[in-house]
Amino acid sequence: MVSPRAGLSAVAIVGPTAVGKSDVADRLAARLSSEVLSCDAMQIYRGMDIGTAKMMPEECSAPLLLIDIVDPGVAYSAALYQSDARAHVERLLGEQRLPVFCGGTGLYLKAALDEMDFPSGELEDERRVGYQELAERIGEEALHALLAERDPESAAVIHPHNVRRVIRALEMHDDGVSYAQQKSKFSVPRERYHALWFGLTRSREVLYERINLRVDLMFEQGLVDEVRGLMDQGLGDALTSMQAIGYKEIIDAFNGVISMDEAPDANSSRCVRVAMPNVSFRGLSAMTVSCGLIWTSLRSMRSLRTSCIVLRLPNGPFPPCSHGTRARACHISWC
């Protein structure tokens, strides 16, 4: 069995949207008598449950931490996540238990596991709000084009759909700092915690199907009512500024930008755009070499270091993770 005594300090389950990370991480943590540390930048927000595919307590076999930390619209950052996550890592290691990270948001995960020092200005300020509003007005592609005009080197290493990172690069440029140059300092990470990474992937066709199934399930479970409730609390602008997938599309429907009938397709399309760069493992070559990240099929996933974990899932697609008994269709065997 994997344990801190085996020279590991954590396990990380990573991969694109709807690939099945939550179920794998939950089962692994339960098997290790440990806890799951979510590293999803949207699941930290209270009340954003259905649209973020957040596992509910009754669905978890192991405790799920680092969710429901703050209210939507409250400033939170990778620097704050780093502090919160490391506190849990130290506690679990002190109890001789191996933390299991699941996500999600790559910057959050690297912030927790690697030696990363964050500059001042990580918290949201008026400038960030301004860029978020600009992104809403002109769209993702135009915002990325603005970055390319000001800092072409940084634009070249950021995907146009990664609005949060584009905004961060614009902020850094305003401060006279190059995102690309800072990123290069982390191209070969210095580990703070030695972690075993499992990267999950599926074929594009299967992932498309799982994303569509997930979106359908979200609407069946009441995503529209969830968004309406958040808007009634005055949080509509915060959800829009965060570019939260699923929420923004429903808000657009409430505001008459699109029809409510169009919202599911818009949601699915945006999920696919975000997921696809991860399927091709864009920009992960350095991480693969330096961190021991293992990208493999969900049908047969094993540790190349100790051969202590073997996961076998069915060949065909099955409903998306995180909700209800249908998500428990996989079979996991351990050696």
Image (cartoon, rainbow, N blue to C red):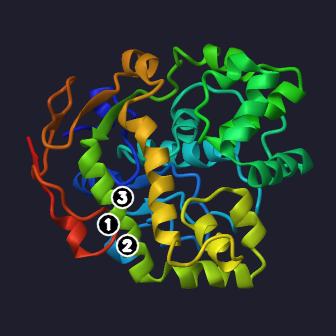
Q: Are marks 1 and 2 in contact (CB under 8 Å)?
A: yes
Q: Pointer 1: residues within 10 angstroms few (<14), some, or many (20+)?
A: some
Q: Which residue is label 2 attached to? A: 216
Q: Which residue is label 1 attached to? A: 213
Residue 184, x across and y down, in percent:
62, 14
| Residue 81 tag number | none
Q: Pointer 3: residues within 10 angstroms few (<14), some, or many (20+)?
A: many
Q: Amino acid at mark 3?
A: Ile
The residue at the point 64 percent across, 84 percent down is 229
Q: Amino acid at mark 1?
A: Leu
Residue 100 appears in the figure: no
| Quarter placement of the N terminus | top left
Q: Quadrant of residue 316?
A: bottom left
Q: CA distance from mark 3 to mark 2?
A: 9 Å
Q: Are marks 3 and 1 in contact (CB under 8 Å)?
A: yes
In this image, 5 relative to 290: left or right? left
| Residue 211 tag number | 3
Residue 204, x across and y down, in percent:
29, 43
